[in-house]
Image: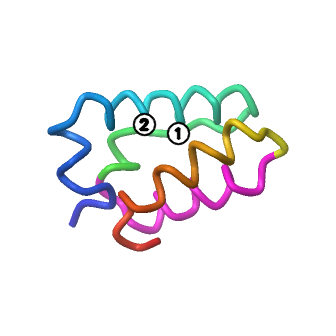
Amino acid sequence: MNAISGQASVGSHTFLDLVDFKWLMAGRGWWVDLSRLQRDVTYAGECLQRGLSSGSELLRQRSVELMPLCQAC
């Protein structure tokens, strides 16, 4: 079961959003495994929740934008 819908593999914009999210998280010291993010619903939810609770407005915004892509969120 994919955590992030098929849109992630189809739309390059969505993939770029995931990569952006990954690097914003890395900037906070939180490493994200993009492969796991796309296939593990629980992991995706945890990553997005962590992003939402960050002190970075940009990271919170990116997390909100990715929430609809997460089937568990």
Task: Say if the magenta span includes residue 5.
Answer: no
Quadrant where the image shows the N terminus: bottom left
Q: Nearer the viewer, mark 2 or mark 1?
A: 2
Neighbour class for label 2 at 10 Å: few (<14), some, many (≥20)? Answer: many
Whether residues under marks 2 and 1 lie with C-beta atoms below 8 angstroms apart, the answer is: no
Residue bearing mark 1: 32
Q: Residue at x 51, y 28 (%)?
A: 20
Q: Residues within 10 Å of mark 1 (few under 14, many from 20)?
A: some
Q: Which residue is mark 2?
A: 18
The residue located at (60%, 36%) in the rendering is: 31
Give the alpha-carbon distance from disc 2 to disc 1, as whole Å: 10 Å
Colour setup of the view = rainbow
Amino acid at the residue labelled 2: Leu
Q: Is residue 2 above or below residue 14?
A: below
x, y percent for residue 46 = 58, 62
Image quadrant in which you'd find residue 2: bottom left
* Vertical side of 30 occupied by 64: above or below: below
Left or right of residue 42, residue 49 in this image: right
Side of 48 relative to 18 (left or right): right
Magenta residue span:
39-54
**Sequence-first tag of 2 and 1:** 2
| Nearer to us in this view, 9 or 39 | 9
Horizontal and vertical percent position of residue 38:
32, 50
Amino acid type of the residue that numbered disc 1 sits on in the rendered structure? Val
